[in-house]
Amino acid sequence: MDSSFARCDSSDSLTDIQPYLDTPEDISTHPDTTWRSDPGGAVLEVVTPENGLDGLKLLQESASFGDLLHRMYAVDRFAASIALPAELQEKMLAAGRDTEKFKTQTCVSVTNRWTLAGSLYNPLRAQRPGMATPAGSAETLTAIKKHLDDYKAENGCDFCQMHTLTASESWGRIQGTYSATAANFAKISDLHGLVLPYEHSHLKVSRDMLLDMLNVAVRWFDKMHELHPDARYPQGIWDTLSRAGASQNHSHMQTVLTRNQYLVGWQQLVRGAQLYTAQNAGARYWHDIVRLHSHLGLRIRYGDAVALISLTPRTPGHEVQIIAPGPSIAFGELWFAMLQVFIHALNLPVWSCGFALPAYGATPSDDSSLPAIATITSRGGQFDRVCDVSSNELHGQPVMSTDPFGTCALIAAYLEANPELLPVMPAECFGQSIRSWPSVVDVMNV
């Protein structure tokens, strides 16, 4: 391997691809951490500071990892008091709201000092008039399933007939066992495509289907880079349903390969990591961000991949970021497991997901590259009355009604109850590239 970011072949060892991950023995020294480890399998960690997120400010004073927390994040806690007229209190009590909690509130601000991602927390935001709960409901999931079936029956689906009703690249399509590529009908750049699973509903995309989609996406990037060697930066998105901005109900990923740098959302991470290294005596941003989330108990590890529960989500809900040195099978497996958590544990089957992969030709000294990253952001309920994105998110700072420590506890409980989602992985499979996934991948010429 010529790079710690390089895509891994099946011969790569865990040692070769480990630079941005902690070893299992270095998971956490926090005394309140509980975790389960299966040899070669998942490591689940849960640590809840006193009073949850409200206690995060106190953790900055902890001798064990307070310096690291302070170096990476600015955490501020504010107390706010308001006066409630008697008539308003009566109305709030009738609606089941605890007036005492509103009279004296606690707000917490968390800002990444290097990427400038930040969130403002107050769980009472979820109790504003017209707001849905931070977690959805089984009834909502049932309604979405019916919506998908009814809409397809009434309107048909072009993506279900992709070979006749979607465009292809001038050179053809990448064909997998469960998915294939298409050319994007309205491109955002010259190298912009689609990965379409044969399954219509994103709720029915299985583990094997997602791994096949990732494999097909990587092969599309490979083909485009072969044809355009100056295009080095692979990334993509996956929105579900109109609530998340998708123009088609049929599940689909979009892929983009860019020149010079990643698209700006990802490039902000690159620049933040570069600043962190430059101003902290060569410290590695991705290593330290994983280590910090480990200490906080906001990390789930599987093979060569980790899932971090975000301290700075983009929308007022839940956000999880999966990170690995490259697009490995474990990366895809953990990605799928987290999607099942969103669908079944959080009852939030509408998401906006972005992913980026290491730059082609990255070298150990090339700090313009990212590791493999997939970020899943909840987008509220498909039928919610109030939009989840407001001027706060667009022009100010995202405002949260959830607590990442509570999110982590829900995730850990669901994975513990469903161990088949992250089966024990033999050590020799650690770091195995998604290219070795046994799905048939061919280039279909036009």
Image: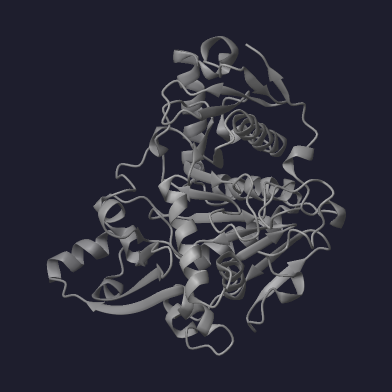
Foreground of the two, 25 or 8: 8
Residue drawn at point x = 50 percent, y = 61 percent: 310
Q: Is residue 369 left or right of residue 438?
A: left
Q: Nearer the viewer, residue 217 or 134?
A: 217
Is residue 344 shown above or below 156?
below
* In this rendering, position of residue 128 left or right of residue 109: left
Q: Position of residue 341 (x, y in %)?
A: 59, 50
301 vs 350: above or below: below
Q: State the image coordinates of residue 338 (x, y, percent, origin top left).
A: 61, 50
Q: Is residue 184 above or below residue 95?
A: above
222 shown above or below 64:
above
Figure quadrant of residue 14: bottom right
Q: Residue at x 74, y 52 (%)?
A: 422
Report which quarter residue 103 is drawn in: bottom left
> Is residue 100 visible in this depiction of the protein?
yes
Where's residue 194, x and y in %? 54, 28
Name the quarter where the C terminus is drawn.
top right
